[in-house]
Every structure is written in C-alpha cells, then in structure tokens.
Amino acid sequence: MLSASKGRLKETRARRPANSGSSARKRRARVNFVSVAQLLLVEDDPAIRGALIRALTERGHAVTSMPSAMDALQYVLDSPPDLILLDLGLPGLGGYEALRMMRAVSSVPVVVVTARDNEAEIIRVLDAGADDYVIKPFGAGQIDARIRAVLRRAAQGGPPDGGELEVGGLRLDPSGHEATLDGAPLDLSRREFDLLHYLAMHAGQVVTRRDLLTNVWRMPYGGADKTVDVHVSWLRRKLGETAQQPRYLHTVRGVGIKLSAPG
Ligand code: CA
C-alpha cells in the first residue's frame, strides 16, 4: 500500500542558474529555450568540433566549445549551460571521469557522445548520470533531436519526485534519495533508487521493461533490455531477496516486474 500521495509533481524544478552575461539571459527570456539552447560542447577533435558547432548553430542552438574536460568543468561551475555534449574519448581527464565530477556539482543535462558501441559502456555512463547518449558516427538531425528531447524532459522536471512512499517495510524519500528497509538504510545507486521509486509509485501493478526503460532510463526500447534485468537483480540483492524467493520484487514472466509488500 502506498501511504504517500502519488500526486503530480508540484514543483517545477527550478531552471538552472542563468548563464552569465545579461544579453544571454535576455535572449533566452524572449525565446522558447527548447529551440534556442546554450550548449557546451566538449570535444577534442577539431574536425568533429567544427562540424558539430556548425550543424547545431544552424539548428538554432548557441554553442560554446571546449577541447578538454578540465576547462569544461570550470566553465560549468562559472556559467552553467542548458546542456552539455560530452565526448567520452578525451585526452587527460576522460569523459567518464568528467561526467562523475560534473554530477557531483551540477545537474545540467549531459548527452554523452561515444565512439564505443558497447552496451556495458553505455550502461556505465547512464548510471553515472548521463541523460542520453549518441554513438559516433551520427547525423546532425539525430543529435539535435536527442538534445531537444533531453531539454524538454529537463524543463518538465526530470524523474518523478514528490512525497515519501511506503510499501510494506520499504520507505522511499525522493527528496533525499533515501531508502530504508525495515528501518535499515539501503545503499542504492541513483539509478537503483529511481528504479525502486518508479516501481513503488506503481506498487501492485506489473510494470513492463519498456515502461522502465522509457521512464527510468529515458532510453528507447530495444536491444538494451538486459539493463533492466541487471538492475533488478542488483536491487534484489540489496533487498536481501532472490528471484526464486521474492519478497518485494516479483518477475511476471513475459510481462515485467511488480513491486508489492510481502504477504
Ligand atoms: Ca575524442
């Protein structure tokens, strides 16, 4: 049973602090920011950087570019952009480390650009807080569409928030990303918390993998559906249960996952 309301989001997440410079602020105040966004492009390859700047500028975005992650981190602290396009293959401080450092200080949406068509790598960056990814080589239309989708979600307030949820001995507090089971704190990654929270919001209902990929991972369905199963198995371990002897997380074969309080 849910003790907290599963009411709609009340708070519209505050927009990130405006870029420094009042002209940027004024320009953004006048236009729909989904169509004109301040992007920070972090890419060391001058040819790719040039091509992306051209393509994104043509599509109406304002693009600042940096060749290294250290410069980008400083820039993000000083004047947060609307979105960061982050190449993973950077010399020195790599894109993955940079992403983790950015996430520690900033919630600016990040779209990762990677040449590595490798599912494990993609899961790793999404878990580290990337909002989406594109695999090189990609067309300008695709990256523009992904940027716009991420900005739309950011404007809508990101993942579900709201009040505390309680299902059996499980309590989830989205404001602090804290979870306890029978009073004992659970040590969950951000993604594990989001997954558990989403399942708890739909307690008693079977949630499909497609639903989870779309709403928790913000990923299109297809190909990467092992992601969900892997995270469910990690969650099970942390909840002290197994697929064979479930307490909270019940796999409904061929359909999805259901969270319910132990009978
Ligand atoms: Ca590179």
Image (cartoon, rainbow, N blue to C red):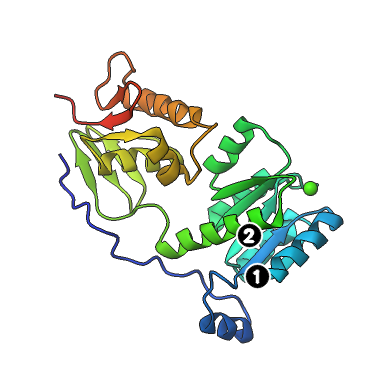
Given residues 218 and 99, the one toward you in this image is 218
Secondary structure under the numbered disc 2 in the rendered image = helix
From the viewer's perspective, is residue 230 above or below residue 125? above
The C terminus - image quarter: top left
> Which of the 4 quarters of the picture holds residue 165?
top left
Give residue 218's position: percent from left, percent from top.
Answer: 47, 46
Q: Earlier in the sequence, mark 2 or mark 1?
A: 1
Q: Residue furthest top?
A: 244
From the viewer's perspective, is residue 199 above or below residue 247? below
From the viewer's perspective, is residue 62 above or below residue 242? below
Give residue 110's position: percent from left, percent from top.
Answer: 59, 54
Q: For residue 133, which numbered disc appears in the image?
A: none
Q: Residue furthest right?
A: 47
Give the residue displayed 61% in from the left and 31% down from the top.
120
> Which of the 4 quarters of the picture holds residue 65?
bottom right
Given residues 94 and 37, the one toward you in this image is 37
Give the residue displayed 36% in from the left and 67% down from the top.
12
Given residues 182 and 27, the one toward you in this image is 27
Q: Which residue is mark 2?
A: 144
Secondary structure under the numbered disc 1 in the rendered image = loop
49 to the left or right of 246: right
Q: For residue 61, which numbered disc appears in the image?
A: 1
Q: Give the class, few, some or many, for how many residues have Cα within 10 Å of label 1's Cα (few <14, many ≥20).
A: many
Give the residue displayed 57% in from the left and 66% down from the top.
82
Give the residue displayed 75% in from the left and 45% down from the top.
137
Task: Name the kind of residue labelled 1 in the image.
Answer: His
From the viewer's perspective, is residue 242 above or below residue 248? above
Q: CA distance from mark 2 to mark 1?
A: 9 Å
Task: Name the kind of residue labelled 2 in the image.
Answer: Asp
Q: Are marks 2 and 1 in contact (CB under 8 Å)?
A: yes
Could one spot residue 212 in this view of the protein?
yes
Given residues 176 and 89, the one toward you in this image is 89
